[in-house]
């Protein structure tokens, strides 16, 4: 193929470059993958209402999240085991995020340790938390705070690991153990909610909203709650102390059959009513997807799989290039829509089905 010119080109090249077992783990969703597909198809049903004859000679897409400046409203979502995509793993990712001047969220399930990743960071970092034991979580949060991470992202849509049927058929667990035994153990060797051996140390299915005040009591970092899809839970998240919310269905990898995130976003935004920042992820592949999310009230979006495609194709450079493609698509589409900055994106820019 010619050099990639969009994220779908990266996806094709990534698939060609990977073992099918790894591709299925990265690409796949849970059960019938209804939500995985819906995250994309929902964007196509939302139409843009552009304005014309606006001066769009300059177009400023810089913004901030929780007060942290970023060069664009596109952040890196946490994803497990970057070492399965490229030998440099999260070292490549964090360098690319720094070069692009945007924020990376490091997964609890990273290949590299949070301290090593932080040492290479040239941009802001958030730390994504899965809670195995309270003691271990407290240790992780303290390590993250110490290392310079500026928020804790608590993922709440994984009380149990879902059924990823591609992985079951491929026996992904055994494949990973045999070929990449350290892929998920950057932070603590025993961590893997996927491995049935370790399921008994994971307390994700026992934690309740009280976990938020507990987290707030052990750290001064803001807590971002990731995996909210309803107005009811957005209200609870705020009441229990969340500083921000990520509308997410885990990229269609947890409960299948939930609404696509771009459709869940408006109700969460309405419920939050300006009390905290709201971000979203799931299916962002084009500049116009970002515009639609911002028009519906997201302050920024996060991207999951595209980072893995960039990594697999060309390590740090691949992630950097993928981010630049998205940046230039966003800037061009904004100009074509009549917006000279993110502040010009109004609700009236989109028409819902
Ligand atoms: C391979 C893979 C691993 C993931 N691992 C994590 C994780 O460790 N923690 C987490 O909170 N979310 C994880 N996610 C979910 C992402 O943070 C994000 O919600 C999702 O990928 C967004 O959808 P997108 O891939 O369509 O952009 C993972 C997603 C993928 C594809
Ligand atoms: O695959 C995932 O989506 C994920 O979040 C995860 C969680 C624990 C271990 C490996 C991956």
Image (tube, rainbow, N blue to C red):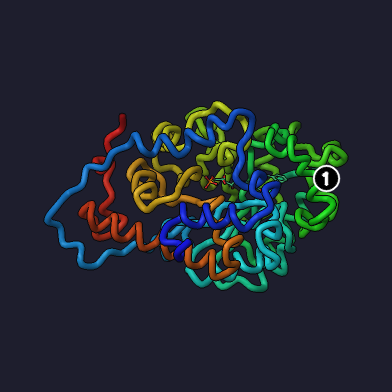
Residue 134 in the figure: left or right of residue 20:
right
Residue 339 in the figure: left or right of residue 262:
left
Determine crowd level at label 1: few under 14, some 14-19, many 20+ residues with C-alpha closer than 10 A: few
- Which residue is more in the foreground, 4 or 65? 4
Q: Which residue is at a point 50% across and 45% down the rendered structure image?
A: 281
Instruction: Determine whether 193 is above or below 62 in the image.
Output: above
- Which residue is more in the foreground, 352 or 347? 352
On the image, the x and y values in percent for residue 74 come to: 45, 56
Query: Residue farthest to the right?
Result: 197
Q: Quadrant of the C terminus?
A: top left
Q: Which residue is at a point 80% across and 58% down the rendered structure image?
A: 182
Residue 87: tell me if it is visible.
yes
On the image, the x and y values in percent for residue 270 come to: 39, 34
Query: Residue farthest to the front?
Result: 1
Label 1 CB sits under 8 Å from any ligand 2 atom:
no
Q: Secondary structure at mark 1?
A: helix
Residue 188: tell me if it is visible.
no
Residue 130 in the figure: left or right of residue 306:
right
- Which residue is more in the foreground, 228 or 44? 44
Instruction: Determine whether 94 is above or below 182 in the image.
Output: below
Q: Which residue is mark 1?
A: 174
- Which residue is more in the foreground, 298 or 42? 42
Instruction: Determine whether 337 is above or below 4 in the image.
Output: above
On the image, the x and y values in percent for residue 213 come to: 66, 42
On the image, the x and y values in percent for residue 286 come to: 40, 51
Query: Residue farthest to the left?
Result: 53
Q: Which residue is at a point 55% across and 65% down the rendered structure image?
A: 124
Q: Which residue is at a point 44% across and 42% down the rendered structure image?
A: 275
Count of numbered tags: 1
């Amino acid at each position: 193929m010619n050099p990639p010119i969009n994220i779908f080109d990266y996806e094709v090249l990534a698939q060609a470059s990977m073992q099918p077992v790894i591709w299925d783990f990265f690409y796949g969703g849970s059960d019938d993958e209804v939500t995985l597909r819906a995250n994309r198809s929902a964007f196509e049903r939302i139409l843009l209402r552009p304005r014309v004859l606006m001066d769009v000679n300059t177009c400023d897409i810089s913004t901030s999240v929780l007060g942290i400046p970023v060069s664009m409203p596109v952040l890196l979502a946490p994803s497990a085991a970057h070492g399965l995509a490229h030998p440099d793993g999260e070292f490549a990712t964090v360098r690319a995020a720094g070069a692009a001047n945007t924020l990376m969220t490091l997964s609890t399930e990273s290949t590299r340790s949070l301290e090593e990743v932080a040492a290479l960071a040239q941009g802001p970092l958030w730390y994504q938390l899965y809670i195995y034991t309270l003691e271990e979580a407290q240790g992780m949060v303290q390590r993250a705070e110490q290392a310079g991470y500026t928020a804790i992202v608590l993922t709440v849509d994984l009380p149990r690991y879902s059924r990823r049927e591609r992985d079951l058929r491929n026996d992904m667990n055994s494949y990973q153990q045999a070929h990449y035994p350290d892929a998920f153990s950057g932070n603590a060797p025993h961590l893997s909610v996927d491995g049935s051996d370790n399921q008994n140390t994971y307390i994700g299915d026992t934690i309740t909203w009280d976990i938020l005040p507990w987290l707030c009591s052990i750290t001064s970092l803001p807590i971002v709650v990731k995996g909210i899809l309803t107005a009811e839970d957005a209200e609870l998240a705020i009441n229990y102390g969340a500083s921000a919310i990520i509308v997410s269905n885990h990229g269609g990898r947890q409960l299948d059959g939930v609404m696509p995130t771009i459709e869940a976003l408006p109700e969460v935004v309405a419920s939050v009513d300006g009390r905290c920042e709201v971000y979203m992820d799931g299916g962002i592949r084009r500049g116009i997807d970002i515009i639609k999310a911002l028009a519906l009230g997201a302050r920024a979006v996060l991207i999951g799989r595209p980072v893995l495609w960039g990594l697999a194709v060309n390590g740090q450079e691949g992630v950097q290039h993928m981010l630049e493609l998205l940046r230039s698509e966003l800037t061009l589409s904004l100009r074509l829509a009549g917006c000279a900055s993110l502040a010009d994106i109004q609700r009236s820019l989109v028409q819902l089905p």
